Image (tube, rainbow, N blue to C red):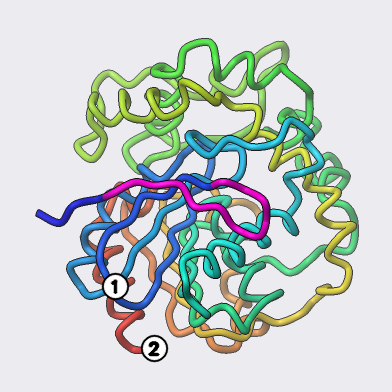
Amino acid sequence: MTEITHRFVQSASGLRTHVAEAGEGPLVLLLHGFPECWYSWRHQLTALADAGFHAVAPDQRGYARTGGPADAGQYTILHLVGDVVGLIDALGEERAVVAGHDWGAPVAWATAQMRPDKVRGVIALSIPHRPRGDAPPIETMRRQISDDFYMVYFQQPDVPEAEFDRDHAATFRRLLYAGSGDAPGLMPIIPEGGGFLDLCPEPDKLPDWFSADDVAAYAAEYAGSGFTGPLNWYRNLDRNWDLTAAWHRARVGPPALYIAGDRDASANAPGAHETIARMPERVPNLRETLWLSGCGHWTQQERPAEVNDAMIGFLRAL
């Protein structure tokens, strides 16, 4: 079996990054989302390595073994793109294909948009490319959705991490089940006086794609770092809007692949289908949009074989 190895990489961004990697060949960076880590790419690391690629899955800034600074202002999209560019260089490469799921997808899109010289191609799972809005996003979410929308809830200091850090195993068991294609469907509006996990029922049994060992692996990866770093990404949404005015409506030039589950709440949110349909206007080299029937939010974990096939086909065609 192909072995996944681990090490720390120091880059020009100043971040000492933990990476899991496998294989040799053209570099493919695999950027996880919330609330995940390198482990979410366990199926892709070995598949891409066997297909002739150097697959590298970092724990991104603030997450798991990498950790990060205490200052919430050090988690902007410019820092996150800087980490990706610094990692490509530190791995001895000029360019890479950058793949991202959930929060990793906006980082992948932004890297391709801001530094196309470093990106051979971009693969986004779950989150489509969304052009910069005309107003700060938190204000927009409050107006268009609700003050109780989960991203607004995450703006509070200490409150969401106290909830998530109370029992890591329960947090991952409930969150990953609730967002999957096996669950009834997630409406991310926080109930009055409640928290995010109130939206996430305890599963009667775990889905076939997610075992008790997987729950334990995620809980172990978060044991030393907790949730403050990951939540700080959300706390920079308005700051990111301020910082990215220079890229307002800028196109994403590198070749791209988009994959989503048709039961993913993110891909079915109000306006999401229109955004996805109009992506070629802003991503003119979008090669394919692939919908996975019956799949929820955790695309590469729920449907590893289909995601692997799509990724490898895209990579080989570059």
Reading the chain from its start, which is encountered first: label 1 or label 2?
Answer: 1
Q: Eyeballing the image, is 67 above or below 306?
A: above
**Label ID, residue 292:** none
Q: Which residue is mark 2?
A: 318
Residue 12 magenta-highlighted: yes
The residue located at (54%, 55%) in the rendering is 104
Q: Based on the displayed image, in which of its 4 quarters is residue 46 positioned?
A: bottom left
Left/right placement of residue 44 relative to residue 103 reads left
Q: Nearer the viewer, mark 1 or mark 2?
A: 1
Left/right placement of residue 68 relative to residue 126 reads right
The answer to whether marks 1 and 2 mark residues whose Cβ atoms lie closer than 8 Å is: no
Q: Where the N terminus falls, by quadrant?
A: bottom left
Q: Position of residue 33 (x, y in %)?
A: 51, 47
Label 1 crowd bin: few (<14), some (14–19), many (20+), radius 10 Å: many
Left/right placement of residue 58 relative to residue 10 reads left
The residue located at (72%, 54%) in the rendering is 79
Q: Eyeballing the image, is 273 above or below 166?
A: below
Instruction: Check disc 2 and give the amino acid type.
Output: Leu
**Label ID, residue 53:** 1
Instruction: Check disc 1 and give the amino acid type.
Output: Phe
Q: What kind of element bears circle 2?
A: loop
Q: Nearer the viewer, residue 217 or 143?
A: 217
Residue 237 magenta-highlighted: no
Q: Position of residue 314 (x, y in %)?
A: 35, 80
In magenta, the rendered stretch is: 5-16
Q: What kind of element bears circle 1?
A: loop
Q: Position of residue 95 (x, y in %)?
A: 51, 79
Q: Position of residue 54 (x, y in %)?
A: 32, 68
The residue located at (65%, 60%) in the rendering is 12
Label 2 crowd bin: few (<14), some (14–19), many (20+), radius 10 Å: few
Residue 273 in view: no
